Image: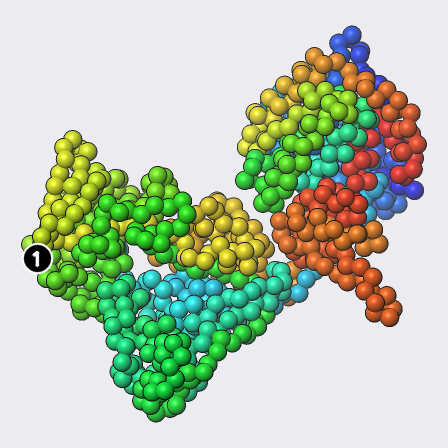
Amino acid sequence: MQEKSKSDGAFEPKLTAFVCNWCTYTGADLAGTSRLQMATNVRIIRLPCTGRIDPLFILKAFERGADGVIVSGCHPADCHYTSGNYHARRRFAVFNDLMEFVGIDPGRLTFSWVSASEGAKWRDVVNEATSKVKALGPFTTYPNAGLALGEVAHASA
Amino acid sequence: MARIGVFVCHCGENIGRTVDCTKVAEALKNHPGVVESVDYKYMCSDPGQALIKQSIAEKNLTGVVVAACSPHMHEKTFRRAAFGGGLNPFLCEMANVREHCSWIHEDKEKATEKAIAIGRTIVEKVKRNVPLETIRIPVTKRALVIGGGIAGIQAALDLADGGAEVILVEKEPSIGGHMSQLSETFPTLDCSQCILTPRMVEVYQHPNIKLYSYSELESLEGYIGNFKATIRKKARSVNEELCNGCGACTQVCIQKKIPSEFDAGLGKRTAIYVPFPQAVPNIPVIDRKNCARFKAKAKGILKEACGKCAEACLKGAVDFDQEDRFVTEEVGAVVVATGYQLYTIGKDQPEGLQGYGEYGYGTIPDVIDGLQFERLASASGPTGGQILRPSDGKPPKTIVFLQCIGSRDPQKGIEYCSKICCMYVAKHTMLYKHKVHGGKAVVFYMDIRAAGKGYEEFSRRAIEEDGAIYIRGRVSRMYRDGQTIKVQGFDTLAGEPVEIDADMVVLATAMRPQPGIETLAQKLSVSYDRHGFINEAHPKLRPVETNTAGIFVAGACQSPRDIPDAVAMASATAAKVLGLFSKDQLEREPTVAKVNQDLCAGCFSCEHVCPYGAVEHKEIRDRKGVLLKIVAEVNGGVCQGCGTCQATCPSKSVELQGFTDEQIYSEINALAGCVE
């Protein structure tokens, strides 16, 4: 089950990143090929397009114990699918306002456009989001989420 | 029950240096559903791939996870290996532990921990992968080319010579486009019509090309390989089968003073007319707006209506009652080559664009634009190739040429460079100096942009050999003073105002897309920029494709282009289309959206967000044929797999295969350490 890693006393947050395949995922690949060092706290989930990202993914990530979430895709007008990122932008402009309502500090959620050529920007996004969430501390608003965890996972099997 | 095999790659030292690969393999061995977990030095090598194939057979695997580099690097390699081992390729996924882990971290313990987490995430996803089959769609090996200018002609000929059938649609009565109006072409000064008209005739005679002149695309349905085009054949009022192009009708027409479009308004034509002598097809059209018979009919006068052309026609080809007809053609690909129009400097400005009132275009008869100058210089033009002023028919002793009229002027609404004007102005000065010896050609310019083979040499020649005077600066005002035009400008290099008495002024106006391009783009569902130019799929790597599969773009409807550019683009589209036609069936990735029609409530939110128009309406009927409901259906041939529909669907009844909600939620769960 979910454990907050607190090995040497320092809080190491867990961040889930939802990124599009064409820009940010490739940008993160570029960060790798450029050997840009960054925080180890971010785990990437690859999706074809930011348009595919359901706001529920973000809530679910928090519910399942993420301390922070990053959503990133192609810059406006650069979408591989022409307009997916515009739909995403509209969706998350609304969703961002709901964050506090559901009890999540909006500072835990980072939206960013990172193109396939912006490896360095991806590193910055990762580092900044990590230190921001570190400062906010562990996310504990949904303490009982873990209880339902086994059941849900079981049901979906 | 899932039986997953995990294969951890060291990538030599690339992963192994910062990630303890053996530990990763060990950790994943205990992950529920994993029956095999090994590490190997180079997984992408032949022995590495053999290891995967062998394990699939021996351990009876239902899924493969390769923890190695980025899927952009080797997903295809490992999917092929999985297929070779007898597994559906889409049951194999990659966990990126190189670019996203070993290369960006130094702490071995943390990197190993992260690599394990990445591996678990992908294992959880693969457990929910289902076999997918490559989509195969048939291809109709016929192409539709829209626009019969030089780009359309080139594309049609290349396609037809390559063995494809071509439907060429041209909205004007003749093909040839703007190139047929030009006198000579830069940088060689060869006669435009001499190189163009043989190609026009070739189009007309080619057994693989079907030409619809005086026709427009009405609508386009379908998708790549399977389009259905409806073409409106506008009423010519002349029977194309009967007419032999003798020209008797045009000679007797009583309306003789209609400004000729071909001569850019400088010449006159009749109401029943052929745009120019070399027109293809050489079949006249009745201009119903200007024809005496149709005008009288519109006023309700039927008696004594003119019918001279019909009387003169020995073949009985004139048909006043002809109506627009519609034909349907099935095609597999479309080439858009609709070309350009010049910035209309006077009236009729579209929103956001301003005219150039200060230059007196439309009020001073001797202020003309570049195309009009072409007609004056052309041997087939209204003056027979003599440069004469429109006002009094005298040869001008001084001509002032103004560059960048409209172009590079954000205030007037166009910030781009029209690309061809620097060159054609240089050409105009030369043509003028060659024809009017002792004449003076003055050019006001902002910069001379002569990038192209032989272009710089050409523009230098205009200055050095033919003595054109180039003044760097803009003209602020022009007005008529008796027989001359006072041109007041500023020489920015000398830093002083200049005033020139000109006999004629030629404005090098900006290149804009054809009117109605937006409507056409919407019919084709291709995108266009804010000026109306058709957007290419990628500005560098896919310059002649549009974002809609199967629709290609050539020439000046994509951005300002000169003739060599337009021809190169046209040949490129032909190569693309012939490539598409080289197979009987198209193969598409099966990661497309699929609708659960039991759940779908038919709100069509998906249809609104789909960038490709891939969502169709499907009627669900019971056995008696009673309509139960209308649901969404995704056309797998059109869908590109972005998944925006799935995130939008309120009832979650559309799913992107390969990225289903179930798969993604299980990844999210896996990151939290929660697995089944």
The C terminus of chain A appears in which quarter of the rendering?
top right
Examine the image and state in which quarter residue A48 appears: top right
Please report the residue visible at 55 percent of the width from the left and 59 percent of the height from the top.
B523
- Residue B657 image point, x, y percent: 76, 47
- Residue B389 image point, x, y percent: 15, 60
In the image, taking residue B531 as reference, residue B406 lies left or right, namely left
Most distant residue in the bottom direction: B314
Please report the residue visible at 68 percent of the width from the left and 20 percent of the height from the top.
A107
Q: Secondary structure at mark 1?
A: loop
In the image, taking residue A144 as reference, residue B244 lies left or right, namely left
In the image, taking residue B303 as reference, residue B188 lies left or right, namely left
Please report the residue visible at 14 percent of the width from the left and 32 percent of the height from the top.
B496
* Colouring style: rainbow
In the image, residue B664 sits, relative to residue B598, either above or below, namely above
* Visible residue check, residue B426: no
- Residue B336 image point, x, y percent: 48, 59
- Residue B642 image point, x, y percent: 67, 45
Q: How many marks?
A: 1
Q: Amino acid at mark 1?
A: His
* Visible residue check, residue B181: yes
Q: Nearer the viewer, residue B503 or B572?
A: B503
Most distant residue in the left direction: B438
Mark 1 — residue? B437
In the image, taking residue A115 as reference, residue B96 lies left or right, namely right
Examine the image and state in which quarter residue A29 appears: top right
Q: Chain of mark 1?
A: B
Q: Residues within 10 Å of mark 1 (few under 14, many from 20)?
A: few
Please report the residue visible at 22 percent of the width from the left and 50 percent of the height from the top.
B360
Most distant residue in the front direction: B300
The N terminus of chain A appears in which quarter of the rendering?
top right
